[in-house]
Image: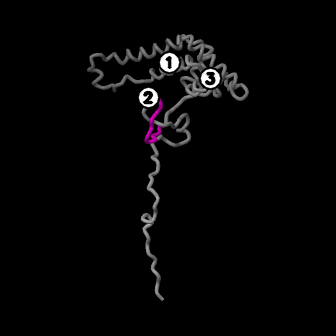
Amino acid sequence: MGKTKRRKVNQRAQSNKAVTLAGSSWDMGATGRANRIGLVVEARGDLDPETGKTVNPNAVKGARKIDMMEVYFKRGWISARGFTAGEMLRNAVEDTMRGPGWADNDRVQSSPKPDQAVAMQIDRLSRLVGITKRAPPECARLVSHVAVGGNAIGSYRVDGKRVYLGRRHEVGKVALRVAFDKFAEAIGC
């Protein structure tokens, strides 16, 4: 009895299918659940001047952080004036958190204007104080909660209780719009 030998066949040679590559998994940052909160994955590309649409021939995608103020503006819960005022407040707060732009080393002491960094920080703080001083006290907490904190209205607390949950969510939407509009009027947006 002889053994029968199987002939090895090149699987690729017999396949008439076109070769395709898997789609590229673009770097979207950390993939844990806590890291994905507030991220939206969207197509990246150039803006076509003729049509005004985004052209993305390579299907490049990117992740971007959005906050609740932007979500509420897109839903129409906040007016354009209120959104602009909220952005002004958020930018003023973020400006105060920025450093002078260079390290504290010999380069700073030898610069012709060593007090420039201090002057910049004082300007940033005075801009923030100017905005927050004009804000009506009845709406300042809610505006700060949504605009600066990036939080939802459902997590807003008064005396330790969440006041805009469940059936009171509609009341919270109205309070949000009124607060942002009053704030915008107060700071002159």
Kindly report which numbered mark, 1 or 3, lies closer to the viewer in this rendering: 3
158 to 35, vertically: above or below: above
Rounded to the nearest whole Å, what is the CA distance between mark 1 and mark 3? 18 Å
Residue 88's label in the rendered image is 1
User: Residue at the spot x=53%, y=11% of the render?
Assistant: 187
Mark 3 is on which residue type? Trp
- Label whose residue precedes the other's in the sequence (1 or 3): 3
**Figure colour scheme:** one colour
| Residue 129 in the image, given as x and y percentages of width and height | 49, 13
The residue labelled by disc 3 is: 77
- Main SS of the magenta part reads loop
Residue 61 falls inside the magenta stretch? yes
55 to 22, vertically: above or below: above
Kindly report which numbered mark, 1 or 2, lies closer to the viewer in this rendering: 2
Mark 1 is on which residue type? Met
Rounded to the nearest whole Å, what is the CA distance between mark 1 and mark 2? 32 Å
